[in-house]
Amino acid sequence: MARMFVPGPVDVAPEVLETMTKPVLPHRSKEYEAIFQRAAKKCEDLFYTKYRVFIGTHSGSGMQETGIRNLAQKDVLACVNGAFAERWYDVAVSNGKQTDKLEAEWGKPIDPQQLRDTLQKKHYEAITIVHNETSVGLENPVKELCEVIQEVSPDTLILVDAVSSLAGTKIEMDAWGIDFLLTSSQKCLALPPGISLAGTSDRALEKAATVENRGWYFDLLIMENHRLKNSTAMTSAVSLVYALDYQLDRIFAEGLDARFARHAAMSQRVYDWAVERGMDSLAEAQYRSKTVATIKNTHSIEIPKLNAYLLERGMRIANGYGTLKNTTFRIATMGETQMSDVDELLGYIDEFIK
Ligand SMILES: *Cc1c(COP(=O)(O)O)cnc(C)c1O
């Protein structure tokens, strides 16, 4: 019974919330360390990595900052075609990195050929890419972009933000060659907000060891030292880690492939519904997000009024992001959402349009 069709925070299953009412263990107790270690191990399967996944006591943006502070001393290339990629660029600039932008129009993918040309002109230590740009409902061709980087500039580290897609879309960290892959708890993982995850390659840690001024809170080497003892340098978000541990069991019980197929089918249902009513997606069909459909508001539906109507039925969708407000709207289908929820929602929207 999912009601939130916004791209995070999303509905959390009651039984997952229930796990957070267990007594809070001291984070340096053997009992807690066992849970922490078990949860982190399960994350490795979710990330398709043989390396490690750090569990951060902060939202995903903190992992954007972690990647930037650790994985480049100076030269960063930020691929930007939406608001969250723009944020990562700002994070890099505000941390004093010399950051160039490779831009595409919002709603258009980052072009592998343009990336190739850019990399042939200048060497970068790290590249930032957003996998699923939540502001425009677009999935960048990350696998192809990784192939270009590995061919033209193999020592450049690849940093990928998959906040709104990981656990909803298949992203194979090691096979694609991603060095730092980050996500937040409150989107496709369907957990409450407050923690984030970052898959981190050995190469990334080796690079971090050479980078100055990594800070303390976000220092990957301090994180790794503690991780090897099944712990964290600072107090862990104990209750959220209980929920993560439990939710990962639910995710693997569904099966990753089944979960990805469910997400793809639900977003496709939204696209088909919209196209039938003469409204196209903002992104071209090939690059449509599989977790957050962003639809051109061709019929000038009054989105705040629609949302008021939906709220009376306990549901909510998202308006367009920033300047795309009212000219687009977004329907996220993440986490606990089922096809029957999507059918119900679209039925209500049809009623409203009439
Ligand atoms: C939501 C989102 C973020 C921000 O994550 P927080 O957990 O709110 O810090 C970053 N990138 C993308 C693609 C997002 O969708």
Image: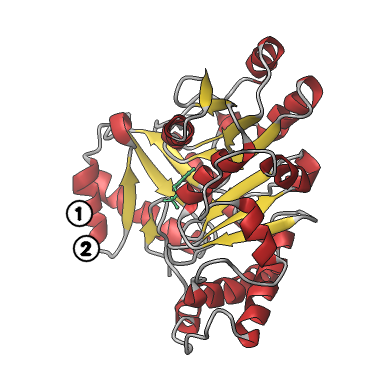
Q: Is residue 15 above or below residue 270?
A: below
Looking at the rendered structure, the kind of residue marked 1 is: Ala
Residue shown at the point (68%, 81%) measured from the top left = 34
Identify the residue at image location x=71%, y=43%.
204
Residue 127, by quadrant, is: top right
Residue 148 spot, x, y in % from top left: 74, 24
State the residue at coordinates (45%, 55%). Answer: 59
- In the displayed orientation, state which residue is furthest to the front: 212
User: How dense is the environment of label 1, judged by Cα within 10 Å: few (below 14), some, or many (20 and up)?
Assistant: few
Instruction: Report the amino acid beneath label 2.
Output: Glu
Image position of 62 (left or right of 128): left
The reply to whether dot 1 and dot 2 touch (C-beta < 8 Å) is yes
Locate residue 112, reporting x and y percent.
Answer: 67, 21
Q: Quadrant of the N terminus?
A: bottom left
Up-down: is 186 above or below 127? below
- Residue 172 in sight: no
Q: Picture quarter containing residue 56? A: bottom right
- Tag of residue 341: none
State the residue position of label 1: 308
Secondary structure type for disc 2: loop
In this view, the residue in front, 91 or 266, is: 91
> Residue beneath label 2, please?
312
